[in-house]
Image: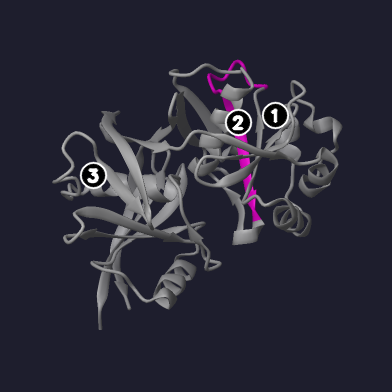
Amino acid sequence: MKTLDYYVVDVFTNQRYKGNQLAVVYTNNDLDINQYHDISREFGYSETSFVHYSTTENVFKVRSFTQAKHEVIGAGHNLLGAVCLALLKKWDIFKTHGDKPWVMIKDDKIFLEITAQDGLPYVGMKQSPAEIVKTVPIEVIAPAIGLTAADLDLNGWDVNIVKTEVAHLMVPVKNRALLQKAVSNKLLLKAASAKFGFEGCYLFTTDNADTGNLAEARFFNPSIGIDEDPATGTAAGPLAGYLEKLGHIAQNQNFRILQGEFVNQPSHIHVKVVDDGVWVSGSSVIVMEGKLYV
């Protein structure tokens, strides 16, 4: 019987039992697609990442799946947790990269910045520049998240689909109380996602001046089996880019987004908009490890 090493890490945090939970499985090579699906369903987290170092391509390769059999791309918690794990376990995954480390998430090359913070690896992932794809009518989205159109009136900002690697819907919410009140109507959100062409729904408010956070956010994505995600790097990057385009923040400054507070998994996602992209950064901690039988 074949065994694989697995690890569970908490991502976008420096404390165990906070952040976004991620299972990481070291595979040595690619698995059968059904094995990816079965293992991801068995762990039951929002995403499971499968990693190996390709000696032919000289690169650390990552593939990630939800328990609903959806393959996830982009620079999110699924990639950050995998890279942080490799650094914590001292795997030599950048041996040929010099001072410009990078990894592959499925077929996409993601460049990294690696430093340390609070005794842990601190990894920045570079996303593409944010692109505003289209506006979605407020009257479509408000009932899909259990709120009214008036509840989404924050600085007059529109509800827009914004993309770096993944196109997510940016939904401004007037204040934190309304952010907490929001609920996911799965049927309505799935219908809106299919009609307008976005992945997940990223609710955010900037009505938090005393917290030190740029924004507080929540993420719903029932189309791929995620009821609520505690930390979503592929949505935090578009949000930072969107706020920069709105003139709310400036380039080359570090900001923090709080997510996961309402599911008791608070996560801190650090973002910085630069001229040629968006950096999304954070740390991870190992919670458990063991053997998986396949």
Q: Is residue 210 visible?
A: yes
Q: Amino acid at mark 2?
A: Glu
Q: Could you say where residue 8 lies in the image, as x and y percent from the top left?
A: 36, 55
CA–CA distance between discs 3 and 1?
A: 36 Å
Label 3 crowding class (10 Å Cα cut-off): few <14, some 14-19, many 20+? some
Which residue lies under the disc numbered 3?
87
Q: Nearer the viewer, residue 133 or 289?
A: 133
Label 2 crowding class (10 Å Cα cut-off): few <14, some 14-19, many 20+? many
Magenta residues, start to end: 207-221
Residue shown at the point (52%, 68%) measured from the top left: 69
Left or right position of 71 against 101: right
Instruction: Check residue 220 for magenta coloring.
Output: yes
Q: Are marks 1 and 2 in contact (CB under 8 Å)?
A: yes
Residue shown at the point (28%, 67%) measured from the top left: 27
Q: Is residue 117 above or below residue 67?
A: above
Q: Quadrant of residue 270?
A: top left
Which labelled disc corresponds to residue 84? Answer: none
Which residue lies under the disc numbered 1?
176
Q: Is residue 147 above or below residue 194?
A: above
Instruction: Check residue 36 for magenta coloring.
Output: no
